[in-house]
Image: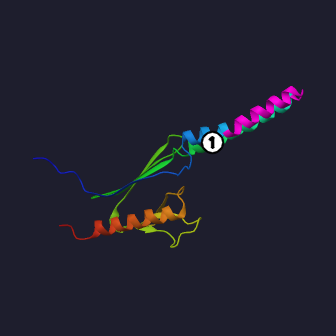
Amino acid sequence: MSASAPTVYFDAWLRPHRSLNPRGVACVLALAAVPGFILGLVFLSLGAWPVSGFLGLDVALLWLAFRLNNRAAREAERVRLSETELTVDRHAVDGKAEHWSFQPNWLRVVLDDPPKPESRLLLSTHGRSLAIGTFLPPAERLEVADALRDALRRWRGPRL
């Protein structure tokens, strides 16, 4: 006798949006580096060699900013509603993982409508709250909230 797989009503990975992929970052860095390199050669030929170092410094700082930005993009949250529970697994940038579990019967999804930039998407039950998707823009937080509310309605509805 085989046990059937549990029904999953909602399963979403929430990740911060990044507008540039690694190839785009390389293009931006190249666009910044080529003129700086040419200007550096001009200043070097004029005897103003310290300027060349400063022209390279701005490209290095731009590279560092992109690296830190892409590191922050590794943050992720998985929100999953199954037949028995709603779970949230959060994976931080530093590799730390956290896990929360909620009983869906009393769970409320709280978000301002329309959401403001400072609005938080909260999962609330029995006096506790957990903010999820803090890195998402307001419109995406609203989409997640609506989809999660719909999944909770289906979970609470009659099961045949």
Q: Secondary structure at mark 1?
A: helix
Q: Which residue in the rendered view is the most extreme toward the left?
A: 1
Residue 60 seen by the camera: no
* Rendered view: 109 above or below 53: below
Q: Which residues are magenta?
A: 31-48
Q: Residue at x 70, y 35 (%)?
A: 33
What residue type is disc 1 on?
Phe
According to the picture, the residue beneath numbered tag 1 turns out to be: 66
* Rendered view: 119 above or below 16: below
Q: Position of residue 27 (x, y in %)?
A: 61, 39
Q: Quadrant of residue 63?
A: top right
Most common secondary structure along the magenta stretch: helix
Front residue of this view, candidates 101 and 132: 132
Q: Residue at x 56, y 50 (%)?
A: 19
Left or right, 37 with respect to 12, comes to right
* Rendered view: 56 above or below 9: above
Left or right, 44 with respect to 142, comes to right
